[in-house]
């Protein structure tokens, strides 16, 4: 019974915030694209806050559960919202804006989560810890997703911003990294630390590139709302 209770708590404290965070992240891309003249997401039913529309079986469900079970950094991803840059008046600049909409939505959600922490002050003791943990994890997960997606590594959102700022020829070659981007990310998060342990070195680029920026965003958000 304790195992079931612990699993339920873990799912609600971690999995539910991840689902909300990545759903709104993807929806933000779709709404931004639609506002800038691209109806692709709307025509494919992705202009929605319904999580079912955005779920990726591996990235939204299996990956967070595996990371939860094996004690890794909890994150996930949803199906990318389709965007057709040909519908934009300024394709490169508008793609950068659409890309930024995702991480900015996560930072906004983190602020909302921080403000919700105040609601625990009027809760009975048996609810205060549970909801307090949920809200704090919601803040952290959104800060983590914002930092992760702002990495300038194709196909992450940060790369779309960099691509929009680079001269066209440089952007063309830079974008060629996209087929390898996820493999590079997996290497940074999982393979390099394991390889480092084998040879007795601390090779933790994920901490430098993702966790530390996420902690910086979290500190900013919690200071902004007066919690820290």
Image (cartoon, rainbow, N blue to C red):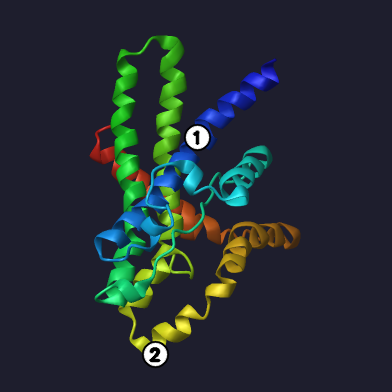
Left or right: where does residue 101 sit relative to residue 211?
left
Image location (x, y in percent) of residue 115? 28, 31
- Residue in the foreground of this view, choosing between 71 and 110: 110
For this orientation, the residue located farthest to the right is: 198
**Is 201 in front, or is 91?**
91
Q: Secondary structure at mark 1?
A: helix
Judging by the rendered image, the residue that carries numbered circle 1 is: 16
Q: Residue at 46% across / 81% down in the picture?
A: 174
Q: Relative to the observer, which residue lies in front, 28 or 109?
A: 28
Q: Position of residue 109 (x, y in %)?
A: 34, 42
Which mark, residue 31? none
Q: Kindly give the residue lying farthest to the front in the view shown.
A: 43
Q: Position of residue 30 (x, y in %)?
A: 36, 57
Residue 76, compared with residue 101, is above or below; it is above
For the C terminus, the image quarter is top left
Q: Pinpoint residue 46: horizontal percent, then vertical percent.
A: 42, 53
Q: How many marks?
A: 2
Q: Is residue 228 visible?
A: no
The residue under the point 55% across, 69% down is 181
**Residue 181 in view here:** yes
Q: Neighbour class for label 1 at 10 Å: few (<14), some, many (≥20)?
A: few
Name the residue beneath numbered marker 2.
169
Quadrant housing residue 49: top left
At mark 2, the secondary structure is helix
Q: Which quadrant does the N terminus fall into?
A: top right
User: In this rendering, would 58 be left or right of 34?
Assistant: right
């Amino acid at each position: 019974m304790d195992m079931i209770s612990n699993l339920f708590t873990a799912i609600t404290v971690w999995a539910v915030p991840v689902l909300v965070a990545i759903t709104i992240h993807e929806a933000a891309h779709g709404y931004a694209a639609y506002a800038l003249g691209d109806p692709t997401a709307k025509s494919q039913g992705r202009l929605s806050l319904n999580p079912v529309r955005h779920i990726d079986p591996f990235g939204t469900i299996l990956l967070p559960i595996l990371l939860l079970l094996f004690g890794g950094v909890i994150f996930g991803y949803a199906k990318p919202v389709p965007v057709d840059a040909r519908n934009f008046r300024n394709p490169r600049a508008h793609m950068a804006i659409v890309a930024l909409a995702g991480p900015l939505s996560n930072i906004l959600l983190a602020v909302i989560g921080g403000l919700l922490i105040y609601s625990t002050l009027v809760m009975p003791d048996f609810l205060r810890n549970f909801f307090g943990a949920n809200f704090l994890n919601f803040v952290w997960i959104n800060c983590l997703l914002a930092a992760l997606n702002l990495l300038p590594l194709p196909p992450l959102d940060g790369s779309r911003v960099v691509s929009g700022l680079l001269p066209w020829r440089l952007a063309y070659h830079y974008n060629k990294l996209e087929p390898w981007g996820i493999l590079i990310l997996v290497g940074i998060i999982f393979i390099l630390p394991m390889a480092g342990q084998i040879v007795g070195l601390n090779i933790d680029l994920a901490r430098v590139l993702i966790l530390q920026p996420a902690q910086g965003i979290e500190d900013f958000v919690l200071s902004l709302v007066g919690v820290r």
